[in-house]
Amino acid sequence: MIEYYPKTQNIVRWVDRLRTLVALAAMVSLLAQYGFYLSDRWAALLTRVDLLIIVFYVLQYLVKISLAISKVKFLKRFWFETLLVLLIILDTATIIRTLGYNVIREVFLNIDVTAVMKVYIAAAQVLIFFTILAEVARHNRKFTHLKFHPSQTLILSFLLVIAFGTVLLLLPRATHPGMELNLLDALFTATSATCVTGLIVVDTGSTFSLFGQLVILFMIQIGGLGIMTITSFFALLFGAGVGLRERVILNDVLNVDKLGTIVSILRNVVIITFSLELVGAVLLLLFWELPAMPLRDQVYFAVFHSISAFCNAGFSLFKDSLIGYRHNIMINSVFMTLIILGGLGFTVLMDLGAAKLLRSSRHRKINRFTIQTKIVTGVSLLLLSGGTVLLYIFEMGKMDWLTALFSSVTARTAGFNTIDVNVMSTSSLLLIMALMFIGASPGSTGGGVKTTTLAVLIFGTISIIRGKSRIEYGNRTIPFTVINRAIVVIFFSLTFVVLAAILLSFTEDAPLRDILFEAVSAFGTVGLSTGLTPHLSPAGKAIIIAAMFFGRLGAVTLAFAITQPGTAPRIEYPSENVMVG
């Protein structure tokens, strides 16, 4: 905690309260400017509001640092805010040096804004965006300290993101002129993006404007990493810190065993995500075949699809997804690599990276892979290779090996497609449904029941058949509590998929094959569809929304959220056998 001089606590407290109000005003101002069509007078007025917000942000920073007892400690703790203030001062000095002091009077009195000032205002709005993030990070701890179970907090965070995203997508400038989006379609799109599913009721590229597409992109990024992961990271970045309560929640989100390693893992997760997405965007930009598109748009397309691929979201700005790149080996390779890496899980990626560093050092003969990494990589390799071979056999003459491999990869919760799913045989669709239901791995950007759940059930079944009292794998013993949890996940997931399919068969006039495929795709947060999604009835859309939400959060999270924590029984009843099988 930063210590301030005696008798100045009230001043700091009031400054923080004003800062919260100003942050809300900044959010409203940005939403008004980018979400609505404004007259020149209103646009000019809001630009002045933006500049006043920037002035306040600098003043409140100067007040707080002047009242801090240790200036060095303050600078270390709030280094990012210090950097923002320095950038603001530097930009202001540059503008004044270029245009003179009269520019200050012109900015607030003259409605017409020069080109130079437009650049400055755009830069100011970027800085305002970061100040809003700083304010959200500052209140992150208050949100996590609400009297909720960690699972309930996680669900609430997703609901808030979906609700906020729905409101943003309903703004006039979120869609192209002449295009309208109703509340249910906006909610469907926001849920699909936040739950990184990719099912769409309207075409993303032709329906949504740049603002609407960016809203979807931010929801995909938040959904892939998790709102608690992102806000906690910015809390660290802006000097707010991560408390014990946040660590407990992140322990569930990131699938980490030790609370003490949360902070370092949190940094690594964000660094890995942004680094891989950046590399993927650069590679896509190099291999795009879009000669008629301006370079700026090509960069934007590359960034959008790279984030969507790594987060296993499946959203595409092309009307036919990636069918146009079906035979492009390099584009296919980049997408498959991003999808696989995003679906392995962050703990596995970090373990693989650490093991590689150890092998390159003097500890070459030491195997440092954890049991989690071995299971995830083994099952993932088996599913990908098996799925590729079977799809190639089932679609003999329709698919080449590259298309079969891509279809096997994308069925693991990614949602992109290089072939029309509707033309596939029933055998292929059943295989894809199985892959979608299994999904990605724990702690990843994907959904499904997870690869480790399948592996644990197989190991448990083998142990029971062999008459063993323990589950063993790789010279390790897996606790029976793990297999109990796996059984719960499978049972609840199958129940929900069957229930969703039954309800869809009642609300939709479509073949059972399409209905079941849609239900599994929504639950697995995959996004593949036989073409039923755009034609869903309002009731059908509501069912798919629930399926996407359930599939992203998982059965265990929802079960913990609606039940009270169990306590050890005071008495133990006598046991009695029940015949099964």
Image (cartoon, rainbow, N blue to C red):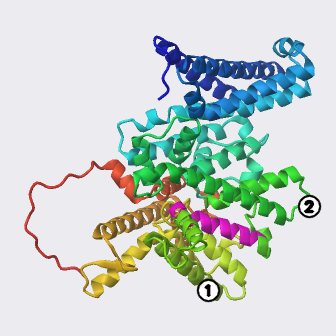
Residue 120, quarter of the rendered image: top right
Can the viewer see residue 36?
A: no
Q: What's drawn in magenta, residue-wise? A: 331-347
Q: Which residue lies most toward the front here? A: 362
Check residue 4 in the rendering and tell me which mark sits there, or answer none: none
Answer above or below: position of 577 versus 194: below
Residue 346 is covered by the magenta coloring: yes
> Residue 210 versus residue 64: which sits nearer the camera?
64
User: Hey, what amino acid is under mark 2?
Assistant: Pro
The residue where tag 2 is placed is 291
> Residue 156 versus residue 234: which sits nearer the camera?
234
Residue at the image point whose x is 52% and y is 51% from the top: 264
| Classed neighbour count for the residue bearing mark 2: other residues with Cα under 10 Å, few (<14), some (14–19), many (≥20) | few
Residue 135, quarter of the rendered image: top right
x, y percent for residue 238: 58, 35
Give SS at disc 1: helix
| Left-right relation of 365 to 574 | right
x, y percent for residue 360: 61, 72
| First along the sequence among labels 2 and 1 | 2
The residue where tag 1 is placed is 389
| Classed neighbour count for the residue bearing mark 1: other residues with Cα under 10 Å, few (<14), some (14–19), many (≥20) | some
